[in-house]
C-alpha cells in the first residue's frame, strides 16, 4: 500500500524537475558581461568608500571600457588611460575569506590622480545589465561600492 502511494508522489517530483533549474555556465555569462561592458560609455552613478558617498567627485567623467582591455576616463579638462580585465571567481578571496569570492571580478588599473587611484581595484561583480554595472570590494570591511550607469 505504501508503495502505491509513494510511486505517484515520486513521479510528480521527477516530472517537475527541468534543465532550467540548473545554474548557467559562468564562462558564457562572463563573455556576455564583457560584451555589455565594452558596448558604450559609462558614468559613475555611485561611489561609496568606507560608507561615505563620494559620487559627486566623478561628476563629468565618462568611462570607456574598450574590448581590447584599454580603459579610458575622460573629463572636460583631462584624460586618463588604464586597463581593465574580467575573470571568474576563485575558491579563495584575495582580501577577505568571508567575501563571496565565487562572483566574477572586474579589475580596474588606472592611475594619474587620486580619483583614478580609488578606482584601481579588483571588484566583485554583483550585477551587470545593459544599463548598469554594480561592483563591490571583495574586502567586506572596506564598505566600498562602485556603480556605473548609462
Image (cartoon, rainbow, N blue to C red):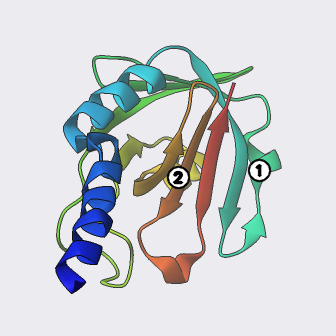
Query: Quadrant location of the C terminus?
Result: top right
Give the structural element (helix, strand or loop) at label 2: strand
Q: Which residue shows up at 33% across the image and 41% down it?
A: 20
Q: Quadrant of residue 67?
A: top left
Q: Quadrant of residue 13?
A: bottom left
Q: Quadrant of residue 69?
A: top left
Question: Is any atom of residue 3 visible in this view?
Answer: yes
Q: Is residue 51 above or below residue 119?
A: below
Residue bearing mark 2: 135
Say few, some or many: other residues with alpha carbon within 10 Å of mark 1 (under 14 / 14 to 19 / 20 or more).
some
| Position in image of residue 91 (x %, y %) | 17, 70
Say few, some or many: other residues with alpha carbon within 10 Å of mark 2 (under 14 / 14 to 19 / 20 or more).
many
Q: Which mark is residue 55?
A: 1
Query: Quadrant location of the N terminus?
Result: bottom left
| Position in image of residue 120 (x %, y %) | 44, 51
Q: Nearer the viewer, residue 5 or 31?
A: 5
| Position in image of residue 47 (x %, y %) | 68, 54
Q: Is residue 6 above or below residue 108?
A: below
Q: Which residue shows up at 32% across the image and 35% down it?
A: 29
Q: Residue furthest front?
A: 1
Q: Nearer the viewer, residue 97 or 120?
A: 97
Give the structural element (helix, strand or loop) at label 1: helix
Amino acid at each position: 500500500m505504501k508503495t502505491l502511494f509513494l510511486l505517484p508522489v515520486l513521479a510528480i517530483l521527477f516530472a517537475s524537475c527541468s534543465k532550467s533549474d540548473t545554474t548557467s555556465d559562468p564562462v558564457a555569462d562572463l563573455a556576455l558581461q564583457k560584451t555589455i561592458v565594452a558596448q558604450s560609455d559609462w558614468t559613475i552613478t555611485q561611489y561609496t568608500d568606507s560608507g561615505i558617498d563620494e559620487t559627486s567627485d566623478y561628476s563629468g567623467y565618462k568611462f570607456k571600457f574598450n574590448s581590447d582591455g584599454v580603459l579610458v576616463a575622460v573629463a572636460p579638462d583631462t584624460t586618463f588611460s588604464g586597463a581593465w580585465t574580467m575573470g571568474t571567481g576563485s575558491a579563495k578571496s584575495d582580501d577577505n575569506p568571508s567575501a563571496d569570492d565565487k562572483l566574477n571580478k572586474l579589475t580596474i588599473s588606472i592611475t594619474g590622480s587620486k580619483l583614478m587611484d580609488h578606482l584601481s581595484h579588483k571588484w566583485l561583480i554583483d550585477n551587470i545589465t545593459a544599463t548598469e554595472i554594480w561592483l563591490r570590494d571583495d574586502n567586506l570591511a572596506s564598505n566600498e561600492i562602485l556603480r556605473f550607469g548609462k
